[in-house]
């Protein structure tokens, strides 16, 4: 897509700190990181959402491999994935090295909608 910042990174129009690249995927450092080593893994084909990527069985093991590599090289305690997808409309998986006392705690709390048990049960009844 012409106006997609990630497609411009793939084509080289915008420079990036690439840490992994193959025929179908690119991983590069987020320049506004949550933690040191915060990486974005993207498919080279433009898809809107991570779940739109046909090769789900490729991208997730690759994300895990990159996460393990980041964890080891940066001496992180563990790593997490974030796939909210709201910032840039090109499918991407954030891979974030995590440290015991980092600031990334209770991240989802700001979005909680304070549902009652009855409301949760109502959704449950639609799903079962
Ligand atoms: Zn794109």
Image (cartoon, rainbow, N blue to C red):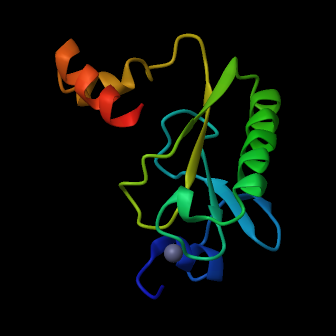
Q: State the image quarter where residue 38 is shown.
A: top right
Query: Position of 60 compared to 53: left or right?
Result: right
Q: Is residue 95 above or below residue 93?
A: above
Residues 23 and 51: in front is: 51
**Is residue 115 at all visible to an observer of this figure?**
no
Residues 15 and 53: in front is: 53
Q: Please give the name of the residue rendered at 65% of the width and 28% of the height, measured from the top-left corner.
A: 79
Query: Position of 57 compared to 45: left or right?
Result: right
Residue 121, how many percent across, how many down?
Answer: 27, 20
Q: Is residue 14 above or below residue 114?
A: below
Residue 34, how many percent across, how many down?
Answer: 48, 36
Residue 19, how many percent across, how many down?
Answer: 75, 55
Total numbered badges shown on the rendered structure: 0
Q: Quadrant of the C terminus?
A: top left
Q: Most extreme residue toward the bottom, as rendered?
A: 2
Q: Is residue 74 above or below residue 43?
A: above
Q: Please give the name of the residue rendered at 31% of the width and 28% of the height, measured from the top-left corner.
A: 125
Q: Please give the name of the residue rendered at 51% of the width and 52% of the height, measured from the top-left corner.
A: 31
Q: Please give the name of the residue rendered at 55% of the width and 77% of the height, measured from the top-left corner.
A: 7
Residue 4, how many percent across, how many down?
Answer: 45, 77
**Is residue 51 at all visible to an observer of this figure?**
yes
């Amino acid at each position: 897509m012409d106006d997609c910042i990630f497609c411009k990174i793939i084509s080289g129009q915008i420079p990036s700190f690439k840490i992994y690249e193959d025929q179908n995927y690119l991983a590069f450092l987020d320049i506004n990181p949550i933690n040191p080593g915060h990486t974005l893994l993207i498919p080279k084909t433009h898809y809107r959402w991570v779940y739109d990527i046909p090769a789900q069985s490729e991208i997730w093991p690759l994300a895990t491999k990159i996460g393990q590599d980041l964890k080891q090289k940066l001496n992180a305690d563990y790593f997490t994935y974030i796939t909210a997808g709201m910032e840039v409309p090109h499918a991407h998986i954030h891979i974030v090295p995590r440290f015991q006392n980092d600031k990334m705690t209770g991240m989802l709390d700001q979005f909680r909608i304070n549902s009652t048990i009855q409301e949760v049960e109502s959704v449950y009844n639609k799903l079962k």
